[in-house]
Amino acid sequence: MTLRTAVGPDDVRAVLESVPDPEMPPVSIVELGMVVDVRVDADAVQVDLVPTYSGCPAIAVIREDVEKALHAMDDVASVEVRFVSSVVWEPERITGPGREKLKSFGIAPPGSGQVLVQIGARPRAVVCPLCGSTDTVADSPFGPTPCRSSSYCNACRNPFEVIKP
Amino acid sequence: MSDPRLHLLLALADDELIMGHQHGHWTGVAPHIEEDLAFSSISQDEIGHSVVWYGIAAELSGKDPDTLALGRPPDGYLNAILVERPPRDWGYTLARHYLYDTAEDVRLATLAESSWTAVAGATGAIRREERYHLLHARLWLDRLAKGPVEARSRLVDGLLAALSEAPGLFEALPGEDELVAEGVLPVTHEQQRRRWLEMITADLSGLGLDHVLDGESHHTGGEFVPTSSGELLTDERGDAANGTTGGGLGGRHGRHSEDFAQVWEEMTGTYRAHPGASW
């Protein structure tokens, strides 16, 4: 019999809340919706993650950060981090607080009006995360990371990034 | 390589790795900054997708993914010859980008129905990401086709050159019958090729470019490439440069063009110079 409370999945999730996305540090991997499953068996922890984009170069860094954070927990002896392909990451997985933090980072979160349109169609304007204007233009469907595209706001004259739909 | 399933994965992975590698050559030197960004992103995506396929191949074969990706001799690579060609000019780059990504669309739609759950599952995220490649490819197909004379004629040249080797993307794999019988490959590559042909015929017809599908013979046709001089641009990089690989075939058996040697040297150089290094 032990008097200590064993580690539970909720404890693990709480620690994962503190692991930032390396390319968007204000947002945690939990807020980005990357955590698919947490399993705890005595002192062994298994975490399943889904990358936002399969080509995301941050995957290795995230794995290391998660391992480091969980190893620092009391009563955790082994940590296994898996990236699974059984779940498809979608922007809708980003939590409410995660979306607010993205905005503060100058990135338009999902729900800002971004849509994937066929060539020739005029996309709806994306709401500028910096000033809230809809007087914005899409610059490129690509951006500085695989999950982001590039836009420009005519109102506040700032370029900004958009989480791809 | 006796396991047809491993062969399938390596063909997929090698296509993606080497296509990504070639697209990456535009980083820093594309015609303008947004295309620099686009090709860098597409390149990163394709290499990322190769990582997914190498990952499944690693589980299957018990080999390390990096060793699979970078540690094989040239004749161990199973990519189609089309993807190992250098980027050449903007017309060829975009023509190949379009043909490759439409082919990939058909291939991924097929594999989404695979009885092999690891493979079918992997197509979910990849297809989501590939939507942007198709949009980009079709945008440029449209733009060049409707652009000035030089743009259209360079696109036609690029399409003719790339089309002559595109069948290699659908070359039957050794052991394909077995893969089809098991449902790992829901339909043959030949059937996939026909689906792809329907898809590109629709796109090209809409732009008055479907004559390129008739291939090299149309090079002397005379009416469809409105060059300023009234002449057709001859593709001097045509069959002779393609070596002995008619239709761009051979890649799935590890037989490559003369261009592959350089790709292999460049792509695996660091890996070979520092065996076992960790990054």
Image: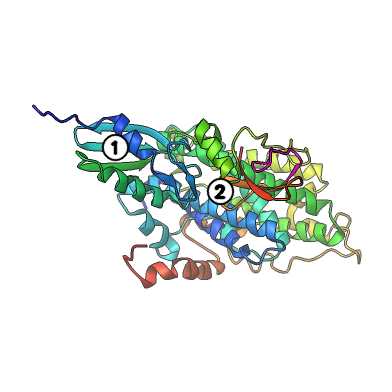
Mark 2 burial class by Cα count in 10 Å: few <14, some 14-19, many 20+: many
The spot of residue A143 in percent (x, y) is 61, 51
Residues at marks 2 and 1 on the same chain: yes
What residue is drawn where x is 75% and y is 41%?
A119
Residue on which disc 1 sits:
A46
Q: Can residue B188 be seen?
A: no
Quick one: SS at disc 2?
Answer: loop
Question: How far apart in space, not on screen, are marks 2 and 1 (Cα)?
Answer: 27 Å
Mark 1 burial class by Cα count in 10 Å: few <14, some 14-19, many 20+: some
Question: Where are the magenta residues, as a range?
Answer: A127-137
Q: Can residue A76 be seen?
A: yes
Check disc 2 and give the amino acid type. Pro
Image-quadrant location for residue B238: bottom right
Check disc 1 and give the amino acid type. Gln
Residue on which disc 2 sits:
A146
Q: Quadrant of the C terminus of chain A?
A: top right
Chain on which label 2 sits? A
Q: Is residue B25 above or below residue B112?
A: below
Colour convention: rainbow
What residue is drawn where x is 69% and y is 60%?
B33
Magenta: main secondary structure: loop
Sequence-wise first label, 2 or 1: 1
Q: Is residue A96 above or below residue A62?
A: above
Chain on which label 1 sits? A
The spot of residue B222 in percent (x, y) is 87, 58
The spot of residue A58 in percent (x, y) is 45, 51
